[in-house]
Amino acid sequence: MNDMTAPDITNLLARWSDGDREAAIQVLPLVYEELRRMAARQLQRERGDHTLQATAVVHEVYLRLHGRSDFQWPSRTHFFAFAARLIRHVLVDHARSRRRAKRGGGAERVTLAEATCLVPERSPDLLALDEALSSLEAIDPRKAAVVELKFFAGLTLEESAEQLGVSAETVSREWRRAKAWLYDRLRPTRGEA
């Protein structure tokens, strides 16, 4: 990540939070590769025929960040957690756009259970997952945050714990419960199976 250290990047993020646009211009190239890795990890979980590439996702995230000074970045971890959320939104927006383009023609909903059985390394239908995750966020924001950090950002238990200000054991417990809740929410009912 270039010659700058984590504290240097954190300093630039803090300056950006205070409205310093020059700091934003300086920091984005420094975090580009990590953002690209995050996007690539997420895209690997998608269908094989996905039309987006990690670089395009990062550029869209950059466009959504560029020129904004209303964000608060107390640390690199906060920045990357927010970036993970933006990556999720970029992918969901892209999926919605593709679905609208098809006008429902042949679009097939894939459940988490089906996705896990058929192709374990791929994600379920991103739109269904997004809807379920939004529902989870409404009833338990921390569990939803854990899913975003682990699934979309690819953070470790320890990194997620640091971001949330809780122990790694708490994140592990919340991750297990969130996965179970999402599995239950996304599996087909008996009438659908």
Image (cartoon, helix red, strand yellow):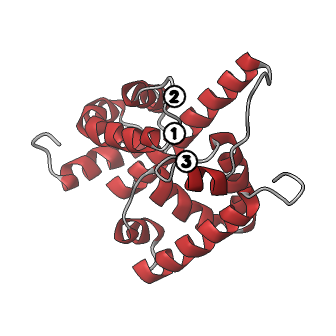
Q: Nearer the viewer, residue 84 or 165?
A: 84
Task: Give the alpha-carbon distance from disc 2 to disc 3, as whole Å.
Answer: 12 Å
Write down the residue under mark 2. Answer: 50
Write down the residue under mark 3. Answer: 123
Counting the numbered discs, the total is 3
> Is the Cβ of the residue at disc 1 closer than 8 Å to that at disc 2?
yes
The crowding category of the residue bearing disc 3, from other C-alpha atoms within 10 Å (few below 14, some 14 to 19, many at least 20), is many
Point out which mark residue 46 bears: 1
Give the image location of residue 166, x and y in percent. Answer: 46, 77
Task: Give the alpha-carbon distance from disc 1 to disc 2, as whole Å.
Answer: 7 Å
* 141 left or right, relative to 84: right
> Is the Cβ of the residue at disc 1 closer than 8 Å to that at disc 3?
yes
Q: What's the amino acid at mark 3?
A: Ser
Give the image location of residue 117, x and y in percent. Answer: 58, 55
Task: Give the alpha-carbon distance from disc 1 to disc 3, as whole Å.
Answer: 5 Å
Q: Nearer the viewer, residue 37 or 64?
A: 37
Q: Earlier in the sequence, mark 1 or mark 3?
A: 1
* 2 left or right, relative to 88: left
Q: What's the amino acid at mark 2?
A: His
Secondary element under disc 2, as helix, strand or loop, is loop
* As drawn, 97 above or below 81: above
Q: What's the amino acid at mark 1?
A: Glu
* Outermost residue toward the top in this view: 101
